[in-house]
Image (cartoon, rainbow, N blue to C red):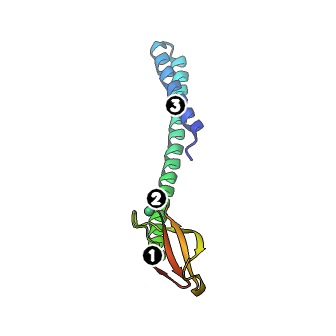
Amino acid sequence: MIDPLTIKSALSSLKTAADIAKTLLGVRDESQMRATVIDLQSAIISAQTDTLKLQAEQSELLGKIRGLETDIVNLKAQLSSNRQVPIALRCPMCSGEMKVKDETPDPHFDFAGVKIHHVECGCGHKSTRTFRAGQYEN
Ligand SMILES: [Zn+2]
């Protein structure tokens, strides 16, 4: 994760360097100028160090994003190959999978094991299906 404190530190170092550079314009004494240049170099090195650290963190995050994108593609492919929705459970409105919400006995053929499945899709479409153990009928 990119550390906000590192960003703040880099910006602070750059501001310090700019302030020192402004001060440097007014310095006339050679020894004071050398000391100010050393301060300026120190501020620049600090900003460079923070910037390199941020670049490394950004690179690491981009690698993680690429890995996650690959994982998503692989999981989607795995899901589509593993999930074969029976036609009777495919939503006629959106082709999504309808889930059985309730099961009631068929009013005429309950004696033969026929049930009514009350199904619902994520899109909101509701319907019923005649169900006999082991298979669906429309
Ligand atoms: Zn649907």
Marks 2 and 1: CB-CB under 8 Å? no
Q: Nearer the viewer, mark 3 or mark 1?
A: 1
First along the sequence among labels 2 and 1: 1
Name the amino acid type tagged 1: Ala
* Between 26 and 130, the one nearer to me in the picture: 130
* Amino acid type for the residue under numbered disc 2: Cys
Element assignment for label 3: helix
What residue is at 52 percent from the left and 79 percent from the top? 131
Eye-nearest disc, 3 or 2 = 2
Q: CA distance from mark 2 to mark 1?
A: 16 Å
Residue hosting label 3: 11
Upstream in sequence: badge 3 or badge 2: 3
Density class for disc 1 (Cα within 10 Å; few <14, some 14-19, many ≥20) is some
Residue 88: give its label.
1
Mark on residue 55? Answer: none
Tell me the quadrant of the picture where the C terminus can be found: bottom left
Residue occupying image coordinates x 39% and y 67%: 92
Quarter of the image where ligand 1 sits: bottom left
The percent position of residue 14, horizontal first and vertical second, equals 50, 29
Query: Helix or strand or loop: what does disc 1 sit on?
Result: helix
Q: Please tell me how crowded label 2 is: few (under 14), some (14-19), or many (20+) other residues with Cα within 10 Å.
A: few
Residue 123 image label: 2
Residue shown at the point (55%, 31%) measured from the top left: 42
Amino acid carrying label 3: it is Leu
Are the residues tagged 3 and 1 within 8 Å (C-beta)?
no
Give residue 120's position: percent from left, percent from top.
51, 64
Residue 43's place in the image compared with 109, above or below, is above
Spatial separation of the CA atoms under disc 3 and disc 2: 50 Å
Q: Is mark 2 within 8 Å of ligand 1?
A: yes
- In front: 137, or 59? 137
- Asked whether residue 112 is in view, the answer is yes
Name the element at disc 2.
Answer: loop
